[in-house]
Structures are given as structure tokens and as C-alpha cells.
Image (cartoon, helix red, strand yellow):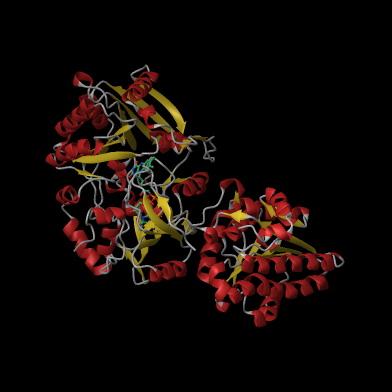
């Protein structure tokens, strides 16, 4: 399979590319930091002897997404969007720059590129799209609702897209990680029992591609945690410090 | 976003409040350098003390890609965060092994260079940096420079064993050992005392690997009672990867578990497990090189207060008497050590402040208890008297004056720092404690 990974610098992407490389897939790694991608490419080629292509990609360069995707040599079989930006909630509450960056990277950028991918897949009547969203999108909480609302938008988008694409034989997977021990969360104190390693998330994604799952929580218990959190009545929820 | 945490290395002492931030590319690191006023790089934190601790730490763990593997020339080019564990997995099935490896594989290539680590083959193969042909370094200006024995050789020599004080080691090319098997032919020999074990070392000086485990509680005629282990790479069977089960010590055992009686019992068992004078066996690479790695987090055995590993080297000339004197002082103190490892070093040519020198090195652990630091200060005096010194990567407590008086090449090292790291950007808790970057 040809797999395009958008946002290939993240820890989850690196783990995912290793997992897919082990199975011998042809990988296209896309992110802004090409120097990083080149190092990852050497590493994957040396260890697993697979084909790897590196392409520069900026999730917020919306106007170029169409051309960018069309310039790929062939249509990929699978497209995975992993790019995201956690940002800082407190800064984003008053700084529009920060808030906009969070919305643009996590939501607008994903919609922009996935619209293009979806059209191409509809034409080809095949393809798998994997969008990495977050449990933060399941309910807005005071500690990260700007990031959370962008991810909520993404989750809703993916849900609608899955619905539309089903009729064209295209599958859409939504991945909702909870806490993941990555560079993005470095320095945060995460509860070990609820925290997944990038490798665990990567395995779940690889598995979801194979078995065409719809919504995957990583780790699985987050499905139940979020279900409970969603069930709390708003009148109570608004008083909580979450 | 990055929050402060208590950071400690393998000895769980000292504990320093600091922020750790990781880099995965040159750009990431440049960004971090600009954002901070000083820092130190940290690999996997397998040094024992404070060499890679500071208020700001740049973690290389994600800078871990293999960039080139040349099987014909038997060399590899790695980013500095690649771990030895990862390399063993990669190399062994392809018929190669690390040229030099310490007693744990959970270290990074950058850490191996910065401490110029030695293995059981120092007497024949030298230290790790002996096998490094070229490396690249990021300076505090964000600029990347290449160095080798011929290009920027002062920087190269200061970086080998330089404890991260010259800059961040980015990529390293080094030579590999070809192996025909993933097993080691091991011979273990009993020695009744110090004279005997040193004689055995001499007798086996051509053996590729040799190391002795010493029972540090023996006195008098049995002082230095030990087991010498020598090894060669087996010529058969064909290489395959090792998979061993891991035991883990999940929490801190209280400090009293390591009182002198438990140490006595441990040493006794270890010594009598092997009844014959000389025993041959064929063991897996992992079992031979990394016996302790099969118990993850064994350092927690020493309890929350942590421990100190005291590793010194004495020059060959002064060696035997010095060793006897230090061993006697240790045995008399009854502070004992769970592990005491004796090794004969060969000649050392790389590194301005690299630790090894031709002579004898002994490494032993001391749980932190009252009176320990005063006792170690006494041991320092003995080490100094015999012309020896301590291994920086194991140290967490020596004094600046003792350090300066035993590392005679510090002046030369500082001259190189003035040229390549004039702003004093790279500082660790250790380098400050020992005034290593003070002009
Ligand atoms: C069980 C055990 C057994 C050991 N046995 C041996 C042995 O037999 N022989 C031996 O020599 N050592 C031995 N050691 C010590 C160990 O090999 C060294 O401390 C090694 O440097 C640890 O590497 P690290 O990647 O964990 O680096 P850290 O411990 O994080 O750092 C060590 C030093 O390297 C510097 N450093 C790390 N990465 C870089 C980089 N990219 N650029 C510049 N500087 C850098 C740090 O600043 C610091 O000064 C042992 C340690 C343990 C825990």
C-alpha cells in the first residue's frame, strides 16, 4: 500500500511509520521540517528496506493544498492526518494569534486538505482516510476548550465525511487519543494508567486501517471515561474544574 | 508549557529541579538554544550522578535515527540519541556488534562519546571514542561543525569524554565489530585474593573481554577474592536476535535491605555458586554484556535516598599497592557494595579529559547513609596519593579541588572551551560543582 502521513514529525507518526514500514508499505512522509523527514527516511530505509518519499507540507498553507495533493505522483491508498497543535489555553484565551493557530492547524488545515483528498478518493472509488482527533473534542472543558473545540470540529467533520464517503466505497477512521506521552505533552504530569505510548496509538491506527474501524479511542478505556463525562448534566458540569 | 520536574539519573542522587525539552531535528535544537540561556544535553540518564542534570535539559532521546549503515566498511552513522539497545537489535542479526559497550545497553551514542565509555575490552580495543571517525556538533551559536582527528581536532579531542560541555553531539560515525555468532565463549576463574586475580588478568591479557567481580568485604589473606570472567565472540552458531524476559523492581525497596549482612550473603552466594576453579560456558551476548539489564530499575534496590557509584582508576605503576590500600579501607568500613567490578585498562589515546588510563579501575556502589560522604572523602585521598582519579560520569559528590588536582589536563580542556564554547552556555550541575567551565 501507499500510505501518506500528514504531520509525519509527531511521535505518533514516527511510531506509525515504523509499524507500517515493518509490514513493507511504501510511505510518503509529509511535514514542514524536511530535514527531520530526511533523517526518518534514512532510518526507515536502513532498518526495513522500504520505499520512502519525503514531501514538504504545511497544514496551514490552505490555498496550496489542492495543487500540493495533485502534484503527488500517484494517488495514495491511505491518507493519515496526524498534524496538530496543542498550544496554550491560557494564552489563547486572550491572544488571537494563538487561538487562530490552534484552530487553523487542528481544524481548518485538516478540512482543507481532507476535502481535496476526499474528492480524489470519490473519483477513484477507493481509499482510506484516517483522521487523528482527540478526546478533548468530546466535551469542552475550561482547561483546554480552544484546542478541544477545534478537535470537536474535526471529529464532526470526520463523522460527516465517513457518512458521505461510505456511499463511494471510501472508508474514514476517527482516532481519538486520550493522554499520549509525546513531545507535545512533555513536562505535563500524566496519569500512567490513562496514558498511552505513541507505539500503542500507532498499533491501534494500523489495526484500524486493516479492520476498517470507525472510531478508535486510544487507550480503549477513554471511550467509557468520555461517555461518563458527556453524561454529566451541563448544570453540574459548568461548576466543575476540569 | 514545559513544567519543572525533579530530575535524577541512575543513582537517584542528586535530585535537581529542572525542565526537560526534547529535540528531533537541528531546527528544534536551534530553537531551544535560542530560547534558553544555558543548558546541558541528556541522553538516557544512565550516568549515576549530576553530569546530565541542570535547570534546563535538552533531551536527545527523540533524535534517534540511523543515517547510514555501511556493511562493507563496517561503519555506521547515527544521530546521537540512538540507543545501544536499539543498535544491538539492529546490528546483531546483520552480523555486527558495538566496538565497545558499557555494562548497560540503555545509553545513547551521544552519552557514549561524552563519557568516552569503556567496556570489558578496553585493554585491547580502547574506549568508545577510539572507534569514532567523525562527528558533528552543534555549538551554542546554533552552528554545526564537523570534527575528527584531522579536522578541528582540538574540538574532537575535547568532546570525547567532554561530558557535553563543548556542545551538542549531533551525529557520530563509528566502526563496528564483525561477529559470527550472537554468543560469547565465556571462561570464569576463581581467584582467592588480589594477587591471584591480577595474575589472572595478566595471563589472559590477550582475551578480548575481561572483567572481575570482587567481594569487597574480604580482608587479610582473602582481600580481593574474586571471579574473573573472560570472553570471546563465538564462531558459531549464526547470529539471531536475543529475546530475554525482563524482571523489574517496581518500587523502591527500603534502604535497610542493603545492610552489610545482605551484601555479605549476596557475595557469598555469588562466589560459591561456581564451585570449580575454572568453568567454561557459552552465553548469549545480553547475558554476558548486560547481566543487570535483565532486572530493569535495579537501582531502586538502594531505596529512595539513592546511592553513589565510586569508580576510580589507578595508574599501572602504583596500582597493586594502591588497590590493596583502597580495598582494605572499604572492607574496614563495612559499608560494602552490592557490586564491585575490577578491570585492567590498556593504553588510552583519545580524549583530553577521558577517564581511562593504563592501570586498574574499580567500581563499587555505596547506598547513601550517614557518614558516607566523609568516608568517600577519605577514599579520595588514597586515590589521589596513588596518582589516580574518579570517573566523572559516575560522580555526584567529589570536590572541585580534588577534581582539579587529579585531572591535570583541565587547563588544556578549558583552552578548547574558550575557543568553541566561549559563552559558557553548556553547564551541568556537575560542571558547576567542579568549576569545569570556569576560565
Ligand atoms: C548499569 C550501568 C552500567 C554501566 N557500565 C559502564 C561501563 O561498564 N563503562 C562505562 O564507561 N560506563 C558505564 N556506565 C555509565 C554509562 O555508560 C555512561 O554514564 C553513559 O554516558 C550514559 O549515557 P546516556 O546516554 O544515558 O547519557 P546521560 O547519562 O544522560 O549523560 C551522560 C553525559 O553525556 C552527555 N551527553 C549525552 N548526550 C550527549 C550529546 N548528544 N551531546 C553531548 N553530550 C551528551 C551528558 O551531558 C552527560 O555529561 C554504566 C551505567 C549503568 C547505569
State the residue at coordinates (16%, 50%): B401
Where residue A227 sits in the image (x, y, percent)?
Answer: 74, 53
Q: Residue A136 sits in which quadrant?
A: bottom right
Q: Give the quarter of the image for residue B33.
A: bottom left
A207 shown above or below A150:
above
Give the x, y percent position of residue A131.
70, 64
Q: Quick check: B409 above or below B304?
A: below
- The answer to whether residue B122 shows anywhere in this view is yes
Is residue B59 visible to the viewer in this orientation of the structure? Answer: no
Please give the count of numbered marks on the rendered protein. Answer: 0
In the picture, measured across the screen, residue B238 lies left or right of residue B264, that is right
Q: Is residue B88 left or right of residue B112?
A: right
Question: Quick one: B166 or A194, which is closer to the camera?
Answer: A194
- Front one among A45 and B108: B108
* Image quadrant in which the C terminus of chain B is located: bottom left
Quarter-wise, where is residue B201 in the image?
A: top left
Q: Position of residue B261 (x, y in %)?
A: 33, 22
Residue at 24% of width from left, 39% of height from top? B373
Q: Residue furthest right?
A: A167
In the picture provided, is A163 more to the left or to the right than A177? right
In this view of the protein, which residue sits in the foreground, A17 or A95? Answer: A95
Farthest bottom residue? A63
Is residue B413 toward the left or the right of residue B28 in the image?
Answer: left
Q: Residue furthest left?
A: B385
Which residue is pictured at 54% across the width and 34% down the height?
Answer: B245
Query: Residue B1 in the image: x percent, y percent?
Result: 49, 63
Position above or below: B336 against B121: above
Amino acid at each position: 500500500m501507499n500510505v501518506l502521513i500528514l504531520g509525519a514529525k509527531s511521535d505518533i507518526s514516527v511510531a506509525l511509520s515504523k509499524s507500517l514500514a515493518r509490514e513493507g508499505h511504501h510511505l510518503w512522509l509529509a511535514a514542514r521540517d524536511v530535514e527531520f523527514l530526511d533523517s526518518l527516511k534514512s532510518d526507515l530505509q536502513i532498518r526495513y528496506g522500504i520505499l520512502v518519499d519525503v514531501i514538504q507540507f504545511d497544514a496551514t498553507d490552505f490555498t496550496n493544498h489542492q495543487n500540493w495533493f495533485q502534484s503527488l505522483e500517484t494517488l495514495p491508498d491511505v491518507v493519515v492526518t496526524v498534524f496538530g497543535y496543542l498550544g496554550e489555553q491560557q494564552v489563547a484565551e486572550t491572544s488571537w494569534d494563538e487561538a487562530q493557530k490552534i484552530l487553523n492547524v487542528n481544524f481548518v488545515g485538516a478540512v482543507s486538505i481532507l476535502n481535496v483528498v476526499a474528492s480524489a478518493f470519490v473519483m477513484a472509488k477507493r481509499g482510506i482516510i484516517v483522521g487523528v482527533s482527540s478526546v478533548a473534542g468530546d466535551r469542552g472543558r475550561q482547561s483546554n476548550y480552544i484546542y478541544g473545540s477545534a478537535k470537536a470540529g474535526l471529529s464532526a467533520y470526520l463523522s460527516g465525511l465517513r457518512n458521505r464517503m461510505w456511499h463511494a466505497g471510501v472508508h474514514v477512521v476517527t482516532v481519538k487519543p486520550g493522554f499520549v506521552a509525546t513531545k507535545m505533552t512533555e513536562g505535563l504530569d500524566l496519569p500512567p494508567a490513562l496514558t498511552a505510548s505513541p507505539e500503542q496509538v500507532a498499533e491501534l491506527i494500523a489495526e484500524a486501517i486493516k479492520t476498517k474501524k470507525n472510531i478508535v479511542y486510544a487507550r480503549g478505556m477513554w471511550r467509557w471515561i468520555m461517555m461518563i463525562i458527556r453524561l454529566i448534566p451541563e448544570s453540574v458540569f459548568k461548576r466543575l474544574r476540569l | 508549557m514545559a513544567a519543572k520536574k525533579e530530575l535524577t539519573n541512575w543513582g537517584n542522587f542528586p535530585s535537581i529541579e529542572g525542565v526537560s525539552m526534547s529535540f528531533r531535528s537541528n531546527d528544534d535544537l536551534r530553537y531551544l538554544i535560542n530560547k534558553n540561556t544555558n543548558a546541558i544535553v541528556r541522553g538516557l540518564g544512565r550516568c549515576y550522578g549530576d553530569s546530565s542534570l541542570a535547570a534546563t535539559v535538552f533531551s536527545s532521546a527523540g533524535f534517534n535515527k540511523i543515517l547510514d549503515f555501511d556493511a562493507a566498511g563496517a561503519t555506521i552513522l547515527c544521530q546521537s540519541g540512538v540507543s545501544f539497545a536499539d543498535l544491538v537489535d539492529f546490528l546483531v542479526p546483520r552480523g555486527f556488534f558495538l566496538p565497545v559497550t558499557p555494562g548497560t545497553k540503555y545509553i545513547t551514542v551521544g552519552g557514549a562519546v561524552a563519557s568516552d565509555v569503556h567496556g570489558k575490552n578496553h585493554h585491547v580495543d580502547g574506549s568508545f571514542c577510539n572507534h569514532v571517525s567523525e562527528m558533528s556538533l552543534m555549538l551554542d551559536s546554533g552552528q554545526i561543525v564537523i570534527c575528527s582527528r584531522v579536522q578541528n581536532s582540538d574540538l574532537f579531542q575535547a568532546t570525547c569524554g567532554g561530558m557535553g560541555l563543548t556542545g551538542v553531539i549531533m551525529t557520530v560515525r563509528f566502526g563496528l565489530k564483525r561477529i559470527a555468532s550472537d554468543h560469547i565463549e565465556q571462561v570464569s576463574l576463581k581467584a582467592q585474593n588480589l594477587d591471584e586475580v591480577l595474575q589472572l588478568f595478566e595471563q589472559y591479557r590477550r582475551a578480548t573481554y575481561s572483567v572481575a567481580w570482587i567481594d569487597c568485604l574480604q580482608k587479610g589473606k582473602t582481600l580481593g577474592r574474586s571471579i574473573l570472567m573472560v570472553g570471546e565472540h563465538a564462531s558459531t552458531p549464526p547470529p539471531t536476535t536475543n529475546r530475554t524476559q525482563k524482571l523489574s523492581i517496581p518500587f523502591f525497596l527500603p534502604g535497610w535491605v542493603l545492610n552489610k549482612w545482605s551484601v555479605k550473603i549476596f557475595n557469598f552466594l555469588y562466589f560459591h555458586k561456581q564451585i570449580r576453579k575454572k568453568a567454561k560456558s557459552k552465553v548469549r551476548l545480553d547475558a554476558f554484556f548486560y547481566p543487570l539489564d535483565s532486572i530493569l530499575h535495579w537501582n531502586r534496590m538502594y531505596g529512595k535516598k539513592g546511592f553513589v557509584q565510586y569508580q576510580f582508576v589507578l595508574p599501572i605503576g602504583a596500582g597493586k599497592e594502591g588497590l590493596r590500600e583502597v580495598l582494605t579501607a572499604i572492607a574496614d568500613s563495612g559499608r560494602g557494595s552490592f557490586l564491585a567490578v575490577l578491570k585492567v585498562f590498556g593504553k588510552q589515546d583519545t580524549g583530553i579529559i577521558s577517564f581511562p588510563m593504563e592501570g586498574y579501575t574499580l567500581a563499587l556502589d555505596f547506598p547513601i547513609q550517614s557518614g558516607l560522604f566523609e568516608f568517600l572523602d577519605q577514599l579520595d585521598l588514597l586515590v589521589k596519593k596513588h596518582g589516580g582519579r574518579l570517573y566523572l560520569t559516575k560522580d555526584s559528590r567529589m570536590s572541585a579541588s580534588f577534581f582539579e588536582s587529579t585531572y591535570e589536563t583541565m587547563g588544556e580542556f578549558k583552552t578548547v572551551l574558550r575557543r568553541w564554547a566561549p559563552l559558557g552556555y553548556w553547564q551541568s550541575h556537575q560542571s558547576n560543582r567542579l568549576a569545569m567551565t570556569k576560565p
